[in-house]
Image (cartoon, rainbow, N blue to C red):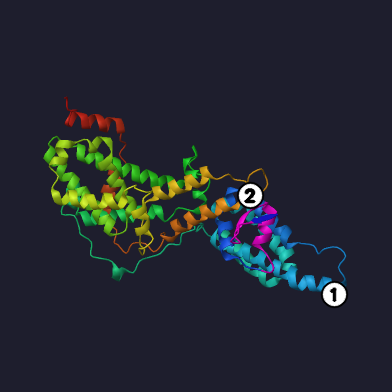
Amino acid sequence: MVLLNLDGTVKGGTLVALVERLTMHNALDTSYIATFLLTYKSFCKTEEFVECLENRYNMHPPEGLTPDELENWTERKQKLVRLRVFNVIKNWLENYYNREDEMILDRLEFFTTTVIRDTSSFAADQLERLIRKRRDTDAYEDVRTMVPNEKSRPIPIIPKNSACLRLLDADPLEMARQLSLMDFKLYSTIRPIECLSKAWSIDDSEGNIAVNVKQSIDYCNRLTCWVTDSILSHDEAKKRAVFIKHWTQVADRCRGMNNYNTCMAILSAFDNSAIGRLRKTWDLVGSRTNQMLGHIRKLMGANRNFTEYREMIHSINPPCIPFLGIYLQDLTFIEDGNPDFLKASNTLINFAKRQKTADVIREIKQFQSPPYPLQALPRLQAFIRQNLNTDWDVDQLYKKSLMLEPRETS
């Protein structure tokens, strides 16, 4: 049983019915197929999905057909359904397979070499080749590695004192470039399965769930702490203001490179309780820096659910690293605000919910390529990594802020 919305899109249905629609003989809904394959792990296991496909391939004719009717059913329905099943399996193996699915390959191979080969050697050959490819390579990731054209790379700005780097030795533009390379490496590896059912919020002692999303979140949190600590490491308000200026320039260069994730991480440091309260320090920040920061705050502001940022992100061309936090917020609202099954049912899967989830995942994937055409500077990246790997205590940072600029007494 499948329920449709007024516009013809799928509202919900049982798993069997949803798979039947996936392999309809008389229609091909590519948008529905993509949504299903992106999100099916939120409502069934891969084993259940494959079992439904096997049953669909082995569909039996209705009882009581005459020989002519049976021939007509075979030609006009069964063969087309089997072709659809083959295409779905092929599509899944090529574009949606994850390393977690490795256990299902034996079952798929058996089904291919027995049932499918008996009906179509062409289809069986293609699937067997894809299954071997999945077994023989470690390239399980959804993201393909792309190498930028070296000729399009800008000449890097080598820090003056590479042997003994300090933060201010790094040009803000080059710092933004290297942060963008590191940030993009994390963002580009996020897989659709990590965006389902708030996987990133699940406590996972073995570190196997939503690894890439969690690493991207950790990168932002650590960068925010580093920015905070670098400002608070100076007793003189004038020096603290210099570091605010430097980081503001880095954030602005990130904005100019469409790296809104790193830009937001830096902005979060300025707006946290440890830095935002430093009135004496902020009084020494120049008007040009404040103006630059004002433009960034306006763009990244949360007003009306980040309206200005959302409009901008939909109008730019990659390479780009969107602010991941907004996508996670959207996915959380979808997950918490919509039931998994339609009302008064434990079998009718709420597919409209999965459509909303898939829309967010597609936007995340849209910016996972191409990569930035930039040259990595190993020494500068090592310096950045060394600072990001520092363990900070947020409470201690706030206490440090109070020591530098005690609360004003009225």
Residue at x 22% of width, y 31% of height: 400
Residue 19 relative to residue 371: left or right: right
Q: Nearer the viewer, residue 127 or 241?
A: 241
Separation (CA) of disc 2 from disc 1: 38 Å
Residue 171 appears at what percent x and percent y? 19, 54
Residue 361 appears at what percent x and percent y? 48, 55
Residue that badge 2 annotates: 349
The magenta stretch spans which residues? 4-26
Residue that badge 1 annotates: 68
- Residue 208: in sight, yes or no? no
**371 magenta-colored:** no
Residue at x 52% of width, y 51% of height: 193
SS at badge 2: strand
Residue type highlighted by circle 1: Asp
Count of numbered circles in the view: 2
SS at badge 1: helix
Q: Nearer the viewer, residue 60 or 8?
A: 8
- Residue 367: in sight, yes or no? yes
Residue type highlighted by circle 2: Ile
